[in-house]
Image (cartoon, rainbow, N blue to C red):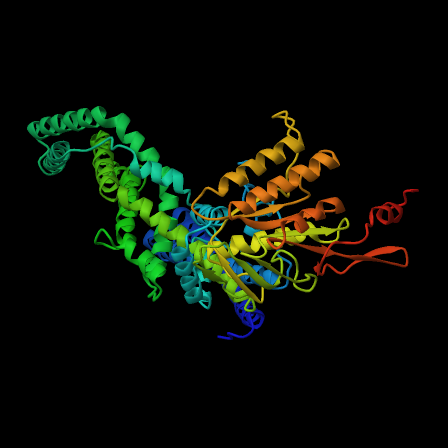
Amino acid sequence: MNHEDPRLEYGRRLEARVGEVRRYEQTSRRIAAARLALAIALLIMAWLVLLRGAFSGWWLMVPAAGFIVLALVHTRIDAGLLRARVAVRFYEDGLARIEDRWIGRRPAKEPMRDESHLYAADLDLFGEASLFELLSTARTRSGEETLADWLAAPADRSEILARQQAVEELRFGIDLREDLATLGAGSRATLHPDRVRTWAAAPTVLEGRVPRILGLIIAASLWTALGAVLSIGSSSAWLFLYGALVMAGGFGAFYRRRVRSVAASVDEQRSALGLLSRILTRLEQEKFGSDKLVAIRSSLDADGLPPSRQLARFARLADMLDWRRGEMVLVLLILAMFRPDVLVLPFSFLLWSTQMAFALEDWRKTCGTAIGRWVGAVGELEALSAFAGYAYEHPSDPFPEIVDEEVATFDAEDLGHPLIPSSQGVRNSVRLGDKPQLVVVSGSNMSGKSTLLRTVGVNVVMALAGAPVRARRLRLSVVAIGATLRIQDSLQAGASRFYNEIRRIRQIMDLTAGEHPALFLLDEVLHGTNSHDRAVGAEAIVRGLIDRGAIGLATTHDLALADVADKLAPRAVNVHFEDDIREGKVVFDYKMKAGVVSKSNALELMRAVGLEV
């Protein structure tokens, strides 16, 4: 494996998977042609047998058997073709991420509906062209939700370090990531954690040893009576059979509604549990060394048998439940061809369904408590694999150093935004801690002030989730993030932008009383009010935040507000972004510089779009 250039490794693997697709397609076409030829041969032979009597009808079994065998082989070939196509897409997506062409290639998770979240919308964590879309390679809803949860809330230091160690171990595990992506290829099965957990934890509707023993006795009586009818055929044997049928019918009727409820719930969950079984089977093949992955792997076998074997038993029972409308009914029909008088026997299959429903409920009662743990393990593995994929595809992005210090710390060298293509991004170094706690960023419109805040915020999110960061170096403590970059009016709530902003700032202020110090990212503080109130209010807000131990950045294009940093020095400093006018166009370098900006470009921008000012 090429550890130095992920682009070459993905390209090599993509070429191999494309070759597999071609081979599978060729084989599939040949088998399809052979099946068609056998079908035609079968029709011709049937015509010769039925109309001409040319030879024995037993010869029809030859093309029929061949057709069945080819159908089974064709199914396996098509399954392999689907896996190969999904693998092709997997490596194409990987190359797209490396080459910054990833936007829109995978359906993005629904944006978080919780508008009170203190930074998700502000930092573009979810939705189109989001951090989640860049990172997520999850096959299941459980993996998506785990990744989203990790991005939406910081972990504690020990958990972050454990995730970093696990991600580093998984970094070069391309085979595992490919397998997770291709498992269940062609299936619409998806693993909804809440639905599966709710089903697993629901009270059982069928239980008890006595009903199951009674059912077995009735079934044994039924089959004994059937044997007597077929071998003896006496009136007493028929009476015995009718009595057994009455008992079986009564037993089945008593439990019919609950059996149908169990069958319906099993049908709803079997595809999800089938996917879970395939993933866990693959996971059981891995041997891990990091503490986090060892703990995930160990949690699977906490109940004795490996989960793949326990889920395989569920699959067998579910298949046996389906026999009531499949293979065993066919057996009865064949039997009825020879003895029409036993057509009453299908009523006994009410008993078969009841027995299988009891067995499935017993399985759910035994394994239900473990299913939530299995689903959680899959979610964590997929979230860690998503970070590992990012780490592999961006080898120059390091893991941050997570420090345990009383004073909030953020010290970044050459910090960049992971959602901006590397060829276009401009990096800046930012330091926050004891001195300064606050950086006031001034500058003209479009100069890069808000992007700097988002760059700091999104890298903190990645760092505190356990992922690498887009920087040369990053050292930080665990912080609680709050931001005001995307505050809007709310027609539904009847609230203005200014009111929503001050309410968010109140929430950020409340963060300072929490377990971790706060990191605030305030964009154009209080720009919805007049200059005097804005200056007084902004100073009071940032002073209150840093007095409570918070660190952060605040942007402004109102030069009067830059005085706030001078008043709070040395706990606050001014920095700025500049622009230049070249041939009538405003040009930005997006490089952060010390001090306060000395000019504005508002008039130049208005003239650039054709306004006469």
Q: Quadrant of residue 573?
A: bottom right
Q: Residue 490: where, in percent of width, then height? A: 64, 29
What is the tally of numbered marks visible in this picture?
0
Q: Is residue 558 left or right of residue 107?
A: right
Question: For the point 74% across and 34% down, which residue is it?
Answer: 530
Question: 36 or 55, which lies in front?
Answer: 36
Residue 90 percent across, percent down from the top left: 53, 59
Query: 591 left or right of 89?
Result: right
Q: Nearer the viewer, residue 162 or 552?
A: 552
What x and y, as percent, mark residue 251? 18, 27
**159 over 395 or under it: above or below:** above
Q: Work out whether 396 lies above or below 195.
A: below
Residue positioned 69% across, 62% down in the render: 426
Q: Nearer the viewer, residue 62 or 93?
A: 93
Q: Is residue 262 left or right of residue 152?
A: left
Residue 347, by quadrant, is top left
Front-lying residue, 566 or 421: 566
